[in-house]
Image (cartoon, coloured by chain):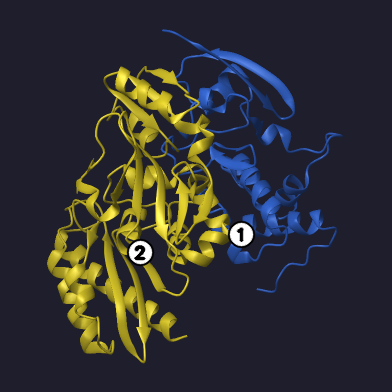
Chain colours: A blue, B yellow
Amino acid sequence: MPTVHVKLKVNGKAVEGQCEPRTLLVHFIRENLGLTGTHIGCETTHCGACTIDLDGKSVKSCTMLAVQAEGSDVRTIEGMANADGTLGALQEGFRQMHGLQCGYCTPGMIVRAHRLLQEIPNPTEEEIRYGISGNLCRCTGYQNIVKSIQHAAAKLRGEEFKEAAE
Amino acid sequence: MIPGSFDYHRPKSVSEAVKLLRGSEGARILAGGHSLLPMMKLRVTEPSALVDLGGIAALRGIKKVGAVILIGAMTTQHEVLASALIGKNCPLLHEAAKQIADPQIRYAGTLGGNVANGDPGNDMPAVMLALDAAYHIAGTGKPRMVKARAFYKGTYETALKAGEIVTAIEVPATPKQAYAYEKLKRKIGDYATAAAAVVLTMKAGKIVTCSIALTNLGPTPLLADAAAKALVGRVPDEAAVTEAVAAARSIMDPANDTRGTPEYRVSVGGIYVARALKRAIARAGA
């Protein structure tokens, strides 16, 4: 089977690999690059567990070919911590506000929320829910995920997170 | 779920893309890929080659040219939503784009792919019928233009000939037109069970112009011409809307699928036509 050579940047590092044109980006990231933080959930573009950040867009990496990502700048869950290795604002938010139970959807949720907060630094609850509507969680009922993102948004704005009264 | 094998091409120009499409039997265009790749992963379709339009800069961009807004075919739904020019001149596009799939899919899915695929479940074709948009098409001969209203021939059958590519979508700039897109879907990310696009203008309480188009209520997107005509020149009271809904229902021919029986979809289809009309009428009065 003829293969193609793919070069891109992942979490700030130049990487490359050889794959078939039909190789999906999520498989390239997990298998060629060994970055298994990006999860495969439904494999049918519904669940968002495989979400990565690619050139400033949230992308379901099960629905993109690795060869389409040639030359792009990708960020995965492995690139979400602070430079000193401490938890990034979103990771900290999910930890503080119990934004995960089984954790399967979490990498996709955090990477998606990262892009959402880049675009809307102070989102309303409705904007958060609409913004993560391509990511499914079967544990939390989303309540604590919304709070986790609000927690991170506040921290990134340099404010203290105040939980809304229920 | 991995697609079958294929050759991958990433041309830099439209003419190169046309040449590649014509040179390989069974080649398919790859735009945003969010209709095609899922079908390839299921092996429902196994193209021999993919011609990726992602590297062609000429297929991107949104600009006003005279009385129309010209939108490059590879413009994503996300870029449509981010465009103030579209928001001002064709707000119906914003209202419809917001209801397509989910955020990740809107970053990838393109306007060109949505209108050219010929899937009656896509939302933008009905929007383009209502707005009387036109598609710019490139092939081996001279570039041509086809009205959206003449483009859809059947399910996955369009006026596109082998080797042709939709390069841009031309939408009349109508900042003063009232509009609404009402869509029933089972969940985020689903195609419409039924949806209706409406544009209209009013003067002194009466409807002056009106177009109504329907999504996923037939083998193609449908222009509900008689329904719109039933309203023109009239005060849009309950009786007039009811008459328009009945005319719209009479042309619906939805598939029997997991979204419901034809009877159910015709029933809710009419309800969504009424909702879209009422919201557009309210906007016209505002």
Residue that sits furthest to the bottom in the current view: B204
Evaluate whether residue B266 shows in this view: yes
Q: Where is residue A120? Give x, y as percent.
A: 68, 58
Residue ID for mark 1 = A128
Check the picture and name the quadrant holding the N terminus of chain B.
Answer: top left
Subunit that carries the residue with mark 2: B
| Amino acid type, mark 1 | Ile
Residue ID for mark 2 = B183
- Mark 1 in CB contact with mark 2 (< 8 angstroms): no
The answer to whether residue A110 is left or right of residue A42 is right
Residue that sits furthest to the top in the current view: A1
Q: Residue drawn at (22%, 58%), measured in percent from left and top?
A: B260
Q: Where is residue A67? Give x, y as percent.
A: 52, 22
| Amino acid type, mark 2 | Lys
Front one among A75 and B218: B218
The answer to whether residue A84 is left or right of residue B46 is right
